[in-house]
């Protein structure tokens, strides 16, 4: 059935009780935990481990093979010994185990000096520095919680997995099977420093190659004047058990994109069980397609400092007793200029945000998106629902869409950089205003969201449902947009509620059903882009336990 005829997402909101009696059905055959890593392509001979020729000594440096795993100490790579030549990490039956950080290229707090690469990048661009290539199916693990991956400006990471052979970044405890599924801070995570634009620098600094912003983690710099730059490829990648405080006050994320440009390819990426944020963006214009944020303790998506990319298809599920916000957006931080340019103004298409409504988690309450400090965001075809939490956990809902700071209201007033299309909030506390800020029109945030008073006509096809546990409303079936929503239009109305028309908007690259028609939400069961390469979405002995789904070992 043509989804564009979906018209009546009747009062749709996301109601919990997908299908009869609130049953949730996720087909375990459509998702996998980890995939086979049995192919070996390495250094040749009896040692398949990664190797390179040290340019200073001309000696070959190679990992040590123990018959199963490849082990790399700080003489191969480390914080004090970054890679200065291109290296390929092969796929082996075991794992690549690192005893120190994996730093790619060297940092500079001056304008990066272009270097002739010894190996051209396979993404068709010519990097200035070192290329780290990781083959599909490779597993990389760290023994120390303080270690992490850092890709310096001018260098690239080419991590090209596949649906049946994702690349996995994780901790040694995960490899040995001794880690709790929701354990965090087992190692640092991934930091990529780009030459893109950040509003922490001004035009004069960028023009003079004098933009060198200090990154989180150990001292390194990012920023430049090229929002089209390429820092490589992350495709079919899992990043697990991250977020250690690698420097005082700096807890890293699953992946940190520092002024990373749109030439970088990020598709099919999962942040699983991380102490801080899932994906964090400080400026830049990198686009992300197909993101899974599962059990992220802080913000699943966090952006600031002039980020202007597009995030398409984002499935976000908070932990039973963890998680803060599905999105936290700032123009700049609390001590910054809330109207700095370029303004942080990404596009988010097809998000499904499922907070657990937990209170006082280690990072705060489990909630939906928060826009603050002058940020702008265009949100399309999305579902924000506390329905599962209210029905299965008997919890009161937390706010699901919130604005803070007058600058945020001011930029949203015009609708040019902030607007909402074809999006449903199904939450007990659907919206929350800042008590110290307001729209000039006098609208509340809820009225702005639905264009209740005709002052925000740029917001189209939106619905706010506070009776989110009403069994007569169905928009979710487990993690999926309910088939009845995508195929027959959710054309039922709960008692006392008005019919709301929510027609999916055409969004480039957005989630579709099997017929290719756009849907509201991140993923449909008949066209499941999470299948095969993700971790933890199905019932398994080592991780799958969605709290809202009894069939996967969650809390009924």
Image (spheres, grey):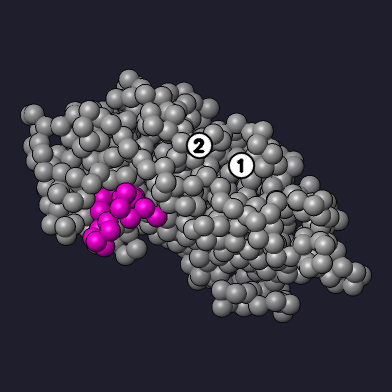
Reply yes or no: does residue 388 show up in magenta.
Answer: no
66 sits left or right of 148 in the view: right
Query: Measured from the top left, where is residue 200 in percent x and y?
Result: 54, 56
Q: In this view, does 520 lie above or below 556?
A: below
Whichever of labels 2 and 1 marks the residue nearer the N terminus, that label is 1
Query: Measured from the top left, where is residue 225 in percent x and y?
Result: 54, 69
Label 1 sits on residue:
242
**Viewer can see residue 88:** yes
Q: Which residue is drawn at 58% across and 44% down?
A: 240
Element marked by disc 1? strand
Disc 2 to disc 1, C-alpha distance: 21 Å
465 sits left or right of 71 in the view: left
**Magenta highlight range:** 513-529
* Observer-nearest of 207 and 286: 286
Q: Is residue 266 above or below residue 331?
A: below
Q: Is residue 554 above or below residue 202?
A: above
């Amino acid at each position: 059935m043509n989804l564009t005829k979906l018209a009546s997402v009747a009062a749709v909101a996301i109601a919990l009780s997908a299908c009869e009696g609130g049953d949730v059905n996720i087909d375990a055959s459509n998702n996998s935990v980890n995939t086979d890593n049995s192919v070996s392509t390495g250094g040749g001979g009896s040692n398949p481990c990664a190797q390179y020729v040290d340019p200073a000594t001309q000696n070959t440096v190679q990992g040590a093979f123990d018959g199963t795993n490849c082990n790399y100490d700080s003489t191969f790579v480390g914080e004090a010994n970054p890679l200065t030549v291109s290296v390929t990490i092969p796929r082996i039956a075991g794992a690549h185990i690192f005893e120190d950080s994996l730093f790619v290229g060297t940092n500079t707090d001056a304008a990066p000096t272009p270097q002739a690469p010894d190996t051209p990048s396979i993404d068709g661009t010519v990097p200035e520095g070192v290329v780290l290539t990781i083959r599909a199916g490779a597993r990389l693990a760290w023994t120390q919680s303080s270690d992490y991956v850092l890709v310096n400006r001018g260098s690239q990471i080419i991590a090209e997995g596949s649906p049946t052979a994702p690349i996995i970044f994780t901790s040694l405890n995960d490899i040995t099977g001794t880690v709790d599924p929701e354990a965090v801070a087992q190692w640092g995570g991934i930091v990529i420093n780009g030459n893109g634009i950040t509003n922490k620098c001004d035009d004069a600094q960028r023009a003079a190659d004098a933009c060198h912003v200090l990154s989180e983690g150990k001292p390194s710099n990012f920023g430049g004047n090229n929002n089209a730059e390429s820092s490589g490829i992350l495709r079919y990648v899992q990043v697990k058990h991250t977020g250690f405080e690698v420097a005082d006050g700096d807890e890293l994320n699953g992946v940190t994109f520092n002024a990373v440009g749109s030439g970088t390819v990020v598709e099919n990426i999962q942040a699983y069980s991380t102490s801080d944020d899932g994906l964090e963006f400080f400026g830049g214009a990198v686009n992300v397609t197909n993101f899974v944020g599962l059990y992220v303790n802080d913000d699943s998506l966090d952006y600031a400092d002039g980020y202007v990319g597009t995030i398409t298809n984002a499935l976000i599920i908070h932990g039973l007793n963890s998680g803060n916000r599905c999105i936290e957006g700032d123009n700049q931080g609390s001590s910054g200029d809330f109207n700095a340019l370029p303004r942080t103004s990404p596009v988010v298409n097809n998000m499904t945000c499922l907070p657990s409504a937990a209170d006082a988690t280690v990072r705060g309450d489990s909630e939906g998106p928060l826009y603050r400090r002058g940020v702008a965001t265009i949100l399309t075809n999305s579902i924000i629902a506390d329905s599962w939490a209210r029905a299965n956990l008997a919890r009161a809902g937390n706010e699901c869409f919130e604005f803070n700071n007058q600058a945020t209201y001011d930029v949203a007033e015009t609708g040019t950089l902030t607007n909402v299309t074809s999006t449903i909030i199904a939450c007990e506390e659907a919206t929350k205003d800042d008590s110290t800020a307001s729209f000039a029109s006098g609208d509340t945030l809820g009225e702005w969201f639905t264009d209740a008073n005709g002052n925000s006509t740029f917001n189209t096809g939106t619905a706010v449902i506070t009776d989110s546990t009403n069994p007569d409303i169905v928009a979710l079936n487990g993690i999926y947009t309910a088939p009845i929503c995508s195929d027959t239009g959710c054309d039922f109305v709960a008692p006392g509620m008005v019919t709301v028309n929510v027609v999916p908007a055409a969004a480039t690259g957005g989630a579709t059903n099997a017929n290719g028609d756009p849907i509201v939400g991140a993923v449909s069961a008949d066209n499941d882009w999470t299948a095969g390469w993700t971790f933890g979405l199905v019932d398994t002995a080592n991780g799958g336990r969605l709290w809202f789904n009894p069939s996967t070992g969650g809390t009924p």
